[in-house]
């Protein structure tokens, strides 16, 4: 957003973007320093990193950039654009360059752009239209939404429902197939736009309820007439390669879906209920997968402990947390730090969520006998150096994984425990001998996901005392805590996306602890804290101080 590709343009901006945002009171010096550090590690522009961390919104950055060029900053949604003006710029060009025409007066075409410094796009537009271009600033998300609305590319879900219901026979393909296809596509597009991870289609006695899980919380989106249930479910089954005629058994499949310029994967699961088949779609956006530790948001101290373990030639690295806490993302990020060119790397996954280069990935399939334990046993005959086991679910897998770590392999996996410290007694309960844990365990990462405060409506938190009591921590002297008021950009939730909070239990933290049968989670925790381990709550409070994380969600995650 703040890249400068033209020297002449650069001369118009004598001061850096970060300084301008500081002057405007949008970010603090501490936030700027953190954003610059993350930008140096992971690349991209400062504006993009500030938005990713939740320190500044697209609108705020765009407004500052517009002020630098002495250009106006506009709200696209409020602009009325006539059809003749829209015809000057093809919709494909508008989407590609993130711009939208607003008005033409004589030979001057006013265009809203997210990046007002994008000279290449401005030149291309001048050549295409033969007009002089006047640029105004606008937020990128507002431009993309404006393109959909003002070009009339999106047929509303409500109108599609009316069109399908108006068909004489809902099962007549010639009368209803195209609208049903559009309807299902629109639901998926809407879910992706709202950053939903899951889409629930829940049959009830007289309707079908559609809910999106956004940032871990379910929100109701719409109700369908009951008459649409069969055609919508059938369409989804066709997309997922499932048996359309089977309604009595659960089915699972995968739907590849093209969303604009990017490909997303959707896992589909159907389950018979008393009112028909329940359908849940898990949306997996490949472009959002974080494949390096620098982008995880983990602190330098904890990251150093993880990197130390990753560099070891053998041993066991475990990630713990509840379902949906980002464990797979952390494992993928850890794999990205390893040399897959000089090492033989395998994964056992259920399911394979993202395809990784130079890594042989194995899909678990219990129906044909390919379980984690049998797969691991077979995999060990493939001369592996590094093994990722998606989850340690049973005693046999736990013991095989530990033995593999002891015999010269680096093993990464996940466990369902409430904390990093709980991993030790959990492994013992699964039949792993205490001495093997002492010999093989390199590091355990405990994590949770908490909702990120919406940067568009962030405001100072007023009731800090409440959270001091709930967390049993004195927060009164601290500043920087924020809360989301709720706005259209976050759909009035006050939150936008999620961030992870971590605790890292390193083998050094257990150096003075005698691991034995009967050891408790608290025994491990107290020994690790005495050796310097930080708990997850400490990381959560630190991120809340920066105005990123929510104290309310921190209470929910660790309270």
Image (cartoon, grey):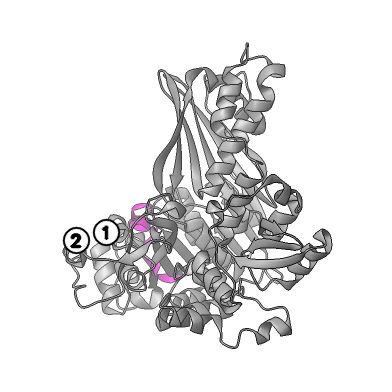
Magenta part of the protein: which range? Answer: 426-439
Label 1 residue SS: helix
Q: Earlier in the sequence, mark 2 or mark 1?
A: 2
Give the Cα distance between marks 2 and 1.
Answer: 7 Å
In the foreground, 370 or 73: 73
Image coordinates for residue 243, horizontal then vertical, percent: 63, 24
In the foreground, 294 or 310: 294
Left or right: 375 in relation to 418: right
Question: What residue is at 63 percent from the left and 68 percent from the top?
Answer: 115
Image coordinates for residue 306, horizontal then vertical, percent: 47, 73
User: Which residue was labeled with disc 2?
Assistant: 470
Label 2: few (<14), some or many (≥20) within 10 Å? some
In the foreground, 473 or 430: 473
Image coordinates for residue 488, horizontal then vertical, percent: 44, 52
**Based on the displayed image, in which of its 4 quarters is residue 274 positioned?**
top left
User: Which residue was labeled with disc 1?
Assistant: 555
Left or right: 4 in relation to 400: right
């Amino acid at each position: 957003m703040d890249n400068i590709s033209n020297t002449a343009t650069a001369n118009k901006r004598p001061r850096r973007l970060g300084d301008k945002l500081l002057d405007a009171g949008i970010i603090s010096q501490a936030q700027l320093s953190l954003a610059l550090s993350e930008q140096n590690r992971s690349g991209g522009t400062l504006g993009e990193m500030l938005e990713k961390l939740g320190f500044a919104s697209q609108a705020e950055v765009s407004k500052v950039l517009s002020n630098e060029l002495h250009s106006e900053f506009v709200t696209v949604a409020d602009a009325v654009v006539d059809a003749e003006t829209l015809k000057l710029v093809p919709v494909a060009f508008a989407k590609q360059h993130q711009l939208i025409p607003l008005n033409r007066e004589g030979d001057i075409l006013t265009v809203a752009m997210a990046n007002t410094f994008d000279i290449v796009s401005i030149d291309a537009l001048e050549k295409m239209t033969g007009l002089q271009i006047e640029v105004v600033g606008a937020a990128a998300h507002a431009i993309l939404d404006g393109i959909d609305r003002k070009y009339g590319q999106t047929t509303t879900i409500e109108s599609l429902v009316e069109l399908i219901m108006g068909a004489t026979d809902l099962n007549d393909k010639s009368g209803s197939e195209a609208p049903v296809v559009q309807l299902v596509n629109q639901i998926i597009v809407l879910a992706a736009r709202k950053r939903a991870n899951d889409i629930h289609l829940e049959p009830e006695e007289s309707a079908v309820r559609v809910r999106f899980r956004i940032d871990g919380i379910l929100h109701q989106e719409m109700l369908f007439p009951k008459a649409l249930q069969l055609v919508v479910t059938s369409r989804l089954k066709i997309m997922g390669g499932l048996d359309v005629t089977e309604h009595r058994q659960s089915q699972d499949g995968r739907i590849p879906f093209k969303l604009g310029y990017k490909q997303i994967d959707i896992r589909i699961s159907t389950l018979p209920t008393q009112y028909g088949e329940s359908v849940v779609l898990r949306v997996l956006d490949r472009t959002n997968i974080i494949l390096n530790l620098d982008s995880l948001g983990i602190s330098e101290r904890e990251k150093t402990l993880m990197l130390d373990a990753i560099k070891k030639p053998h041993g066991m690295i475990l990630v713990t947390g509840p379902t949906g806490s980002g464990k797979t993302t952390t494992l993928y990020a850890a794999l990205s730090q390893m040399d897959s060119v000089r090492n033989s790397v395998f994964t056992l996954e259920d399911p394979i969520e993202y395809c990784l280069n130079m890594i042989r990935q194995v899909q678990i399939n219990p129906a044909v006998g390919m379980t984690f334990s049998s797969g691991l046993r077979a995999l060990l005959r493939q001369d592996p150096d590094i093994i990722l086991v998606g989850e340690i679910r049973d005693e046999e897998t736990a013991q095989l994984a530990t033995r593999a770590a002891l015999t010269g392999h680096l093993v990464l996996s996940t466990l369902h425990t409430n904390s990093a410290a709980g991993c030790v007694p959990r492994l013992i309960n699964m039949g792993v001998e205490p001495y093997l844990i002492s010999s093989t365990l390199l590091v355990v990462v405990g994590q949770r996901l908490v909702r990120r405060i919406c940067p568009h409506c962030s405001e100072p938190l007023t009731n800090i005392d409440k959270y001091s009591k709930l967390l049993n921590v004195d927060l009164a002297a601290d500043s920087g805590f924020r809360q989301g008021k709720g706005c259209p950009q976050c759909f009035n939730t006050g939150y936008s996306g999620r961030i992870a909070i971590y605790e890292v239990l390193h083998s050094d933290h257990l150096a003075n602890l005698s691991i034995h049968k009967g050891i408790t989670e608290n025994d491990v925790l107290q020994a690790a804290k005495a050796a310097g381990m930080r708990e997850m709550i400490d990381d959560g409070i630190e991120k809340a101080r920066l105005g990123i994380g929510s104290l309310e969600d921190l209470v929910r995650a660790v309270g």
